[in-house]
Image: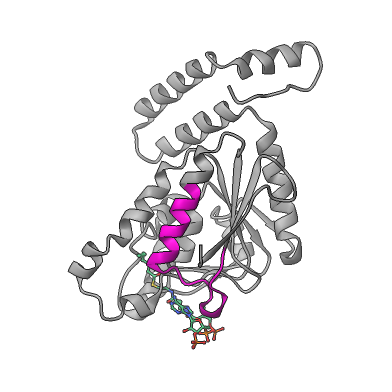
Amino acid sequence: MENILLEYPYNNHPHIALVRLNRPKVLNALSTDLMQELIDCFLGLDKNPEVRVIILTGNERAFAAGADIGQMVTASPIDQINDQRFRTWEMLRLITKPIIAAVNGFALGGGCELAMACDLIVAGDDAKFSQPEIKIGTIPGAGGTQRLTRAIGKSKAMLMVLTGDMIDAKTAFEWGLVAKITPAPALLQETFELAKIISDRAPVAVRLAKEAVNKSFEMTLKDGMDFERRNFYLTFSSLDQKEGMKAFLEKRNPDYKGN
Ligand code: CO8
């Protein structure tokens, strides 16, 4: 892999992997190759039964400053269809394990969209988010008009998408785009602490919960409630559900095996 770095186990933790976007010279611009490496890496981690939580990060200066403008400047619509660059983005939805985006610096355009495609965002207090495509004559193409609107509401999404201007981490937190803010130097440590908490939870239930929350974006309330109920029932076929409830009654910590 040339464009990303994988640390697994991360901090010697057997259930946590860290994936780092690694094109620092271009502020981690998301080239087609980078996205292909990223999805291949995620699919591998998703298949590994030991991995329970994935952290995706960039560097201090940038999470990612967008799709690679150099690759798009002369592209025709047909070029974009032929190189299937959106296929890799679509495949992010296949990952069943939780992915936490740990964002320092710029998360712009495709970078903001990539962070939003993760399950939750933790931001350093220096993080900056925007959908700046309008400033370069185009519009968001990987969820910026859809996920952002669902996260922060129509009026604020319009403000960001129509002006292209950045918002800071505090604003992103207040608007509900970001789950948690940390001092920038502590971002990875605090995200790791959060990942540890999630990795201590019953892995099958975590995956079913992630799936159900994501369905809320795609279903009516009634269909979503039905879907949730089925996943709820499904947890009762796992040994971890028995272990979790028994451990509670026996006043001890559960020992989840992921089955
Ligand atoms: N693509 C390619 N190169 C980039 C990108 C980018 N998105 N962002 C920064 N770079 C490069 C710069 O060209 C520069 O390279 P060089 O040193 O060779 O000149 C280097 O990174 C450092 O950048 P700057 O010198 O500009 O650094 P500054 O601190 O002055 O500015 C900014 C930082 C504000 C982040 C500025 O670089 C910027 O505005 N970048 C572009 C942001 C942007 O417009 N992003 C949206 C891109 S379009 C998009 O994401 C659409 C997504 C659609 C879905 C995906 C489909 C595949």
Q: Is residue 101 above or below residue 197?
A: below
Colour scheme = one colour
Q: Quadrant of residue 189?
A: bottom right
Q: Nearer the viewer, residue 93 or 33?
A: 33
Percent x, y for residue 4? 54, 63
- Considering the whole magenta stretch, tell me its main secondary structure: helix
Left or right: where 214 falls relative to 125 = left
Q: Quadrant of the C terminus?
A: top right
**Residue 93 horizontal/vertical position (percent):** 41, 45
Q: Which residue occupies 46% across, 32% down? A: 212
Image location of residue 101, percent across then percent down: 57, 54
Instruction: Find the residue positioned furthest to the right.
Output: 251
Instruction: Note whether 61 is above or below 230 in the view shown.
Output: below
- Left or right: 139 with respect to 125? left
Magenta span: 21-42
Q: Position of residue 57 (x, y in %)?
A: 60, 60
Residue 156 visible from this viewpoint:
no
Residue sitting at the far left: 78
Q: Is residue 168 above or below residue 49?
A: below
Instruction: Judge left or right: residue 92 versus residue 170.
Output: left
Magenta-drawn stretch contains 5:
no
Q: Residue at x 62, y 36 (%)?
A: 50
Q: Residue at x 54, y 14 (%)?
A: 236
Q: Is residue 149 visible?
A: yes
- 116 vs 259: above or below: below
237 horizontally vs 60: left or right: left
Front in this rendered view, residue 239 or 145: 239
The image quadrant that residue 172 belongs to is bottom right
Kindly identify the residue that appears in the image at 41 percent across and 59 percent down: 36
Whether the magenta-drawn stretch holds residue 38 is answered as yes
Instruction: Determine the residue located farthest toward the front in the rendered image.
Output: 1
All told, the count of numbered labels is 0
